[in-house]
Amino acid sequence: MKTSISRERILKSSILFFSITAFILSTLVLTSCSDTETAEETAIEDTALIEKIESATKVTISVDNLPVATETAFRFVLADSFAESAELASGLGYKVVLGTDDASKEEATSEVYFSLQGKQLADTDQKRQRRRHHKCFEFVYPIDFIMADNTSITLTSADDWGLIKAWYKENTDVTERPELVFPVDVTLEDGTVQTLIDTDELRAVKDSCKKGKDKRKCFKLVLPVSFTMEDATVIEVTERADFKLLREWRKANPDATVKPALNFPVDIEYKDGTTATINDQTEFDAAKDACKI
């Protein structure tokens, strides 16, 4: 037996369906607008409080005396940073100078602000945001750090910066910062991957970053090359991946203080594709100095 459905019933069902759908959509839109307005209002209020903290008379306090609630920010948003110093503006909040072990950042220090309760304030100042967030490059993970007790910590992704913070929590009497183990691979903004073999090359890239210049290295080594280590071990680098052998040696010899010695002669290739033969350390240093001109 066929069941007949009246047109009137279909019409009523359709009206009910569209009414419910419209109600749900309007609720979602209103909620979204409300959340956006709340976030904007919070940012305005936080900005006003930051300005008051900045202009107020402040007293220096120990970073250990910051509110416990600040740990939430340092555990997540500021995981790659640590408090170098702190100031209290009475009745207003805290100004904290941050340091970072993340050498990919353009600036080594920045500022952040907290309420008296320890909530990180939303800072809309573009200059401060750039100091805190702008990066010259991205590390190609993994990267390694040698700690003050000669142990090593390996970061396999950007999410692992908290491992260094955790080490310092367990070694509260240590103030010496960790040593980044070279060589490291980095990805520049244009997608170019470069191998930085020492702190000099890292410094040159960051200097170019601050000056808005081409961040690519002035020249690179033409492989194969070899390095003599402090214990007279010779490490051959026949392809880019072999640079990790230098890093592994450094991790296995945390007490080493002598920089790996590049064995000459070597060929170098400049950014324009031209090459040159370098016969000794003096010529190598001269080539690096010429890049600064």
Image (cartoon, rainbow, N blue to C red):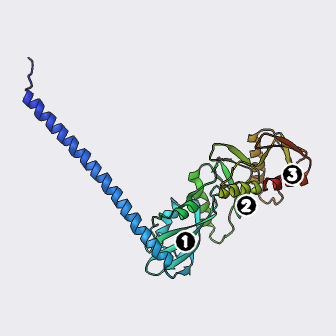
Nearest the eye: 43 or 156? 43
How far apart are the two marked residues, 3 and 2, measured between alpha carbons?
Answer: 31 Å
Q: Three-letter amino acid code at disc 1?
A: Val
Q: Residue 284 got which mark?
A: 3
**What amino acid does circle 2 point to?**
Asn
Q: Residue at x 47, y 65 (%)?
A: 123
Q: Earlier in the sequence, mark 3 or mark 2?
A: 2
Q: What number is the disc on residue 96?
A: 1
Say which quadrant the C terminus sits in.
bottom right
**Residue 150, labelled with which disc?**
2
Q: At x 28% / y 48%, what residue is drawn?
A: 28
Q: Quadrant of the N terminus?
A: top left
| Helix, strand or loop for disc 2 | loop
Q: Marks 1 and 3, Cα distance to the nearest angstrom?
A: 42 Å
Task: Judge left or right: residue 260 versus residue 74.
Answer: right
**Dot 3 and dot 2 residues touching (CB under 8 Å):** no
> Disc 2 or 1, which lies upstream in sequence?
1
Looking at the image, residue 275 sits to the left or right of residue 10; the answer is right
Mark 2 packing: few (<14 Cα in 10 Å), some, or many (20+)?
some
Q: Position of residue 111 (x, y in %)?
A: 55, 68
Disc number lying in front (2 or 1):
1
The residue at 62%/70% (across/down) is 172
Residue at coordinates 68% horizontally, 65% vertically from top-left? Answer: 177
Distance, label 2 to label 1, CA atoms, is 29 Å
Q: Position of residue 241 (x, y in %)?
A: 73, 41
